[in-house]
Image (tube, coloured by chain):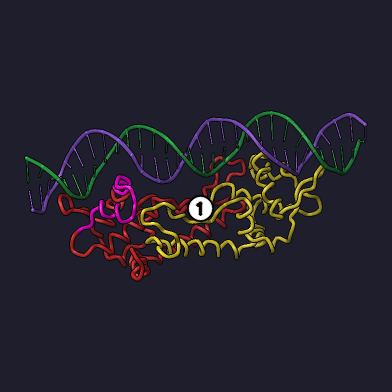
Chain colours: A yellow, B red, C green, D purple
DNA sequence: ATATACTTGACTAAATTAGTCAGGTTTATA
DNA sequence: TATAAACCTGACTAATTTAGTCAAGTATAT
């Protein structure tokens, strides 16, 4: 299983976006400055978020990004999915001698990792962007 | 967060060990053959498991390893800990401009990852080696 | 004695990550 | 209509991590 900075940045950036998204779209430059994330990297991330219709872009001066849906409707699963953060625990070796094909002959701990995967996905499915914003309203930033 | 083959192998090997541990110690060679894990790699893993007193070694001919405790008393946390699988979701950058020190100024999503970490650790703390063995008794290997 | 099996540490190829860099295109506004 | 802000895209790269391999042992049952 792997959860990296890309996923964290995506979530951070969207929380930031959602909080500053009043009338005007929010520019990546602003998010970059506020959150200390490289602008170039943010662009990569937002490109993916846009393709998955989590955000919409507004080009030109005073442009930026806005959320495509309400914060309550954006679950963390959607975000992490969009930036290719696989919440896969582990793949069993394809060519293992003791071949684990996930069905007839499962490896010793196959069910365990499946179960963990569900456990984690559950967590992310329950959490929406809105939950995170509420979680942060009393804090700086 | 990162869960890699080392952790999976450690758990697989211990399940194997526990199931074949009747009278004689189980040799790494046997585990290696049954589970398709490199012997050299297993040796690294078991060296760590031994230091954390999860297994005991028996040297010489007919030697091998035995569990130090009952399978019911060995939790997955213990195993993953022993082989240095950190169930840390993500560290916040130390030198970030928006400095997240985890206490006074937390970054936007700090609580989220903490929560996830607990969620996962909970899962591993509840599961014992014994649970996994029972889970597998009706299957091959 | 000797073969089996544990013990340790150093090394390495491959993959992945977290970016950077360069060269665009679009559009509000002066 | 020129310009600058801001989006857009793809290629590249340094550093890190992983998943081992390799080599050179030591201990002990038979």
Q: In this view, does B94 lie to the left or right of B63?
A: right
Q: What element carries label 1?
A: loop
What main secondary structure does the magenta stretch of the protein show?
helix
The correct choice, above or below, for D10 with respect to D29 in the image is above
Residue found 26% across the figure and 54% down from its top: B30
Find residue B95 and report its horizontal and vertical position in percent: 56, 40
Would you say residue A108 sits in the magenta stretch? no
**Dot 1 falls on which chain?**
B
Instruction: Give residue B67's quadrant in the image.
Output: bottom left
Residue closest to the eye, B127 or A16: B127
On screen, D9 above or below A70? above
Q: Is residue B128 left or right of residue A113?
A: left
Magenta region includes residue B34:
yes
* Residue identifier under label 1: B89
Image coordinates for residue D13, horizontal then vertical, percent:
56, 30
Q: Of B14 and B138, which appears nearest the observer? A: B138
Mark 1 surroundings: few (<14), some (14-19) or many (≥20) residues within 10 A: many
In the image, the segment drawn in magenta is: B25-44
Quick check: B112 left or right of B69?
A: right
What residue do we see at 30% from left, 60% from top?
B16
Left or right: residue B1 compared with residue A63: left
- State the residue in front, A12 or B79: B79
Question: At which x and y percent is residue C2?
Answer: 10, 42
Q: Where is residue A49 in the image (x, y as percent from the top left)?
A: 68, 51
| Marker count (numbered) | 1
């Amino acid at each position: 299983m792997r959860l990296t900075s890309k996923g964290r940045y995506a979530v951070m950036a969207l929380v930031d976006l959602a909080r500053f998204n009043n009338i005007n779209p929010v520019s990546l430059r602003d998010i970059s400055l506020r959150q200390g994330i490289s602008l170039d990297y943010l662009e990569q991330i937002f490109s993916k978020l846009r393709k998955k219709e989590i955000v919409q872009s507004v080009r030109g001066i005073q442009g930026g990004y806005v959320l495509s849906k309400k914060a309550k409707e954006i679950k963390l699963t959607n975000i992490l999915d969009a930036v290719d953060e696989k919440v896969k625990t582990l793949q069993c070796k394809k060519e293992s001698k003791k071949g684990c094909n996930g069905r007839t002959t499962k490896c010793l701990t196959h069910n365990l990792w499946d179960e963990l995967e569900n456990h984690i996905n559950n967590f992310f499915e329950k959490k929406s962007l809105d939950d995170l914003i509420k979680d942060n309203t009393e804090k700086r930033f």
